[in-house]
């Protein structure tokens, strides 16, 4: 079976970095056509730089990285330095990238790639706010039907919110973009907080990364050492949740996850619940299902896969 062609749309972020590393370490299953950066965890100049830093850490400087939208579609940018640190990749000391940023805008790359590749062969993997994806869909509606699948990290149902009482960060930053994507008709798989909060980097799991004794293994351990301080304090959890690598892991080993095909709507007007993913988990409405909303993960299997793949880099 040939590798799945993907575009990673991202706002790195320590967990985004691990998701990118997992993809670049898995060429049998995943062909990374390009990485598109968006403003989110930190502003765009840092997210595009961080994406290149991660590619060089992986030993894959030939990977194409594109800068995209620097603000949400209709709102001021909200960032998360309080979680990820001032650079977005706080923790390890990583050198500035040498590889060049591509000249083309990320949105144009997404449109061009979906038109150039055979229809139904490119999967979009958004790990941050959905601004780039929604902008591409708005500018070029013809590409929506050409998307194989959208596998994204965002939203929540049982876990409700992590940036407001009711909203997950990626959706909250650009709810209008999320609304466009969820109403697009493209096949969607969602990795919400309900799943990602079960993918916890406990001490033994982090020790396994460090024990790889490679630049990648040590850097990942240092990233999660930094990243986990926020979640331990906020949730009293045993470690940092690796949100975004759930997207990449799903592409490699989908049986790690279970969920339901349900209707998911995005709240764009309420002051109280702006950015909420209103997930009809119990199917109490007659709204048509539009997304496979994951609810559980085999965490041990996930970390076994992740550690084995990181060891390749």
Image (spheres, rainbow, N blue to C red):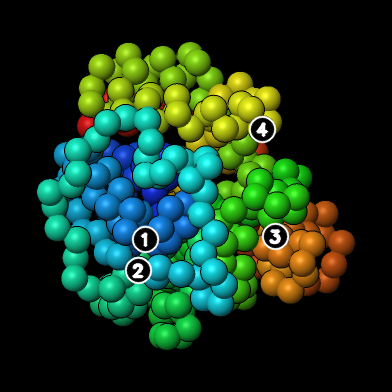
Identify the disc placed on residue 44.
1
Q: Secondary structure at mark 2?
A: loop
Q: Is residue 280 left or right of residue 184?
A: right
Spot occupied by residue 173 in the image (x, y as percentages of width and height)? 57, 62
Q: Separation of disc 2 and disc 3 at Cα?
A: 24 Å
The quadrant holding residue 177 is bottom right
Q: Separation of disc 1 and disc 3 at Cα?
A: 25 Å
> Does label 2 or label 3 sit earlier along the sequence?
2
Q: Secondary structure at mark 4?
A: helix
Residue identifier under label 2: 68
Is the residue under label 1 in contact with that under label 2 (CB below 8 Å)?
yes
Nearer the observer: mark 2 or 3; the answer is 2
Residue identifier under label 4: 234
Identify the disc placed on residue 277.
3
Q: Separation of disc 1 and disc 4 at Cα?
A: 26 Å
Nearer the observer: mark 1 or 3; the answer is 1
Identify the disc placed on residue 14.
none
Few, some or many residues within 10 Å of mark 2 (<14, 14–19, 20+):
many
Few, some or many residues within 10 Å of mark 4 (<14, 14–19, 20+):
few
């Amino acid at each position: 079976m040939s590798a799945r062609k993907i575009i990673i749309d991202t706002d790195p972020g320590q967990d985004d970095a691990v998701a990118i590393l997992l993809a670049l370490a898995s060429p049998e299953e995943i062909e990374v056509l390009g990485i598109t950066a968006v403003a989110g965890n930190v502003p765009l100049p840092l997210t595009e730089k961080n994406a290149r830093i991660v590619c060089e850490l992986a030993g894959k400087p030939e990977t194409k990285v594109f800068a995209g939208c620097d603000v949400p579609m209709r709102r001021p940018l909200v960032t998360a330095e309080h979680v990820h640190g001032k650079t977005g990749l706080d923790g390890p000391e990583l050198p500035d990238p040498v590889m060049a940023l591509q000249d083309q805008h990320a949105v144009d790359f997404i449109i061009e790639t979906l038109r150039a590749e055979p229809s139904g062969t490119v999967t979009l993997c958004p790990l941050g706010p959905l601004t780039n994806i929604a902008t591409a869909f708005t500018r070029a509606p013809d590409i929506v039907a050409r998307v194989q699948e959208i596998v994204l990290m965002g939203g929540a149902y049982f876990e409700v919110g992590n940036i407001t009482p009711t909203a997950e960060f990626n959706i909250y930053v650009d709810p209008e973009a999320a609304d466009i994507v969820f109403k697009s008709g493209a096949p969607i798989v969602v990795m919400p907080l309900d799943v990602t909060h079960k993918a916890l980097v406990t001490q033994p799991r982090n020790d396994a990364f460090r024990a790889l004794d490679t630049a990648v293994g040590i850097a990942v351990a240092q990233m999660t050492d930094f990243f986990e301080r926020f979640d331990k304090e906020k949730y009293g959890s045993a470690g940092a949740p690796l949100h975004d690598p759930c997207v990449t892991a799903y592409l490699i080993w989908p049986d790690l996850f279970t969920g339901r095909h349900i209707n998911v709507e995005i709240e764009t007007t309420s002051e109280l619940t702006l950015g909420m993913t209103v997930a009809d988990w119990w199917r109490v409405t007659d709204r048509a299902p539009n997304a496979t909303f994951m609810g559980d993960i085999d965490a041990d299997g996930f970390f076994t896969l992740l550690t084995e793949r990181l060891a390749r880099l």
